[in-house]
Image: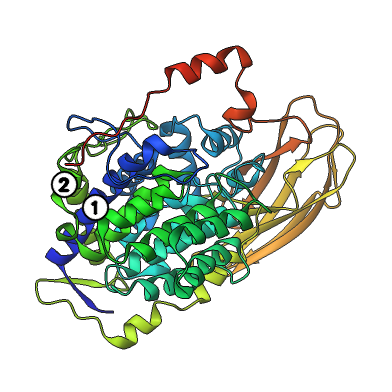
Amino acid sequence: MFKLNLEEYRDKVYGCWLGKNIGGTLGGPFEGGREINDCTFYVQEMNGDPLPNDDLDLQLIWLCMAERHGLFNLTPHLFGDYWASHIIGPWNEYSVAHYNVRNGFYPPISGALNNDEWKYSNGAWIRSEIWACLCPGNPDEAIRYAYMDSCCDHCGEGIYAEMFTAALESAAFVVKDLRKLISIGLSKVPEDSLVAKYVKMACDCYDRGDDWKTARNAIVEENMKGLGWFQAPANIAFTTLGLLYGEGDFGKSICLAVNCGDDTDCTGATAGSIMGIMYGRAGIPDKWLKPIGEKILTCAISKFGLLTFPPATIGELTYRTVRLAQDAQRNNPNFNLFTDEATEIPEDVVAQLSKVEKAKAIWDRPLYQMDYQLSNVMIRVIYENPIVEPGVPTKVRIEVRNPLVSEGEYKLTWLLPEGWSVNKTQARTSAKCWLYGYQEFVITPGEFEEAVEYVTLDVRIQDRNFPNYLSIPFERKDSIVYPKGPEQVLCKEFEDEVLRLRPLVKKPAEK
């Protein structure tokens, strides 16, 4: 526990969102380019408007969700519902997650299923700031929410990437040493992950005295041996490179991140938000803010059906973020305390920021799991693989998790479609007080015509007379193929027209 001055915290949140908007607007025109850029300032006339950016858009939906349900009541299933209802961006992993949830495959399965092309891409780590701002100086809590967020549309490296940025950004509220922040971020991802590998490459190049272009090219060369362009590990490294070689200068940091190329709106926006947290509003020169002001323009979300509309300005976003964080502080004694007094960060507290136990627990979670909440119990379904073939057995583990003190017995009965079989139609288990019981089954699918078959599991609780019917989805192998990216699905007859309509980038005089 430590004390964080409320006004200092508010200023850092303000700097975070300003930096996010500025960096995303700077990098937007260069997105997708694979060459080194030479950007030193905005390259388009904006007339007071920032570029819309999905990096910020999705976080506005998460803010509204947390305001309505309470930060501590968020679940992967709730993220999935809000995704299906409010995320309308059609791109890559966003689209895959949308259709997976619509078919009944909720997070975390939605991030892994039918998503081989984009599961390690950039859609998740670019939206980590909301969790850092709501959990300032508490990276272990920030990565818990970052996991629930990122598993909607990613798995593996895509999740590690958001855990890295969420932890770094959370710690930046109480630590200003960039290398210490990078170390804290790395402590929350596996040492053998590609995210860790490429971040360390950026650090090693900087420490050797390589110039930034040499460092960038080394990362690109290594990356092209594996994942290739538009993936999280290399773009995380480009952001790190910008921060290291920027050496505390806001403009230089975001420009260098953008000049590395690839997903430039993401790298510029995240570099800007980190700088904003570290140095607050005062660390952002006015010349960067004046051309775009404080508006928030969106492109990837639907605002209808929410209890409240998303913030329309950076000032409103800051106010609502701080208000939600204050509510969290009041409702959870394990959160750090805001104070009107000077910030106090004991050294032993800083040392705790790099602990790995809670991060490891997240790394060890099964790839294919999904939770169902019943009246007083949570049922977790863990698939061997949710994609099945008729006649080929597959394993399914059913866990019963009970939050009550009293012990209960639970009867599990499969109501299978015609032609399907299971090694035991009925089984029982018990659980109490946050412990869990489980049963393992081997199901052999029969023939089914639809792409997804919904199999019924009847759960009977010992002291309840009514049945609880769970509908558990199984996808038939090779029945669903989602688009793998614009460059692979764009009809040739439209290609010239798309290129013709792409706005020309012209660099105005620096202001």
Amino acid identity at mark 2: Lys
Q: Nearer the viewer, residue 494 or 59?
A: 494
**The quadrant where residue 71 appears:** bottom left
User: How many numbered marks appear?
Assistant: 2
Numbered disc 2: secondary structure: helix
Measuring from the top left, give residue 408's x and y in whole percent: 59, 64
Task: Name the one closer to the observer, 367 or 470.
Answer: 367
Binning the other alpha carbons within 10 Å of mark 1 as few (below 14), some (14 to 19) or many (20 upward) gives many
Query: What's the residue type where badge 1 is placed?
Result: Thr
Mark 2 surroundings within 10 Å by alpha-carbon count, few (fewer than 14), some (14 through 19), many (20 or more): few
Give the percent coordinates (x, y) of residue 324: 24, 54
Identify residue for label 1.
Answer: 321
Q: Residue furthest top?
A: 493
Instruction: Give coordinates of residue 33: x percent, y percent.
Output: 49, 39
| Picture layout, residue 362 above or below residue 259 | below
| Colour option used | rainbow
Q: Which residue is rendered at x = 56% and y = 18% of the image?
A: 495
Image quadrant where residue 2 sits: bottom left
Q: Where does the image place residue 451, in percent across and percent down from the top left?
A: 73, 28
Q: Which residue is mark 2?
A: 287
Residue 505 appears anywhere in the view: yes
Give the quarter of the image for residue 428.
bottom right
Image point (20%, 44%), residue name: 314
Q: CA distance from mark 2 to mark 1?
A: 25 Å
- Which residue is at a point 43% across and 34% down the rendered structure image? 87
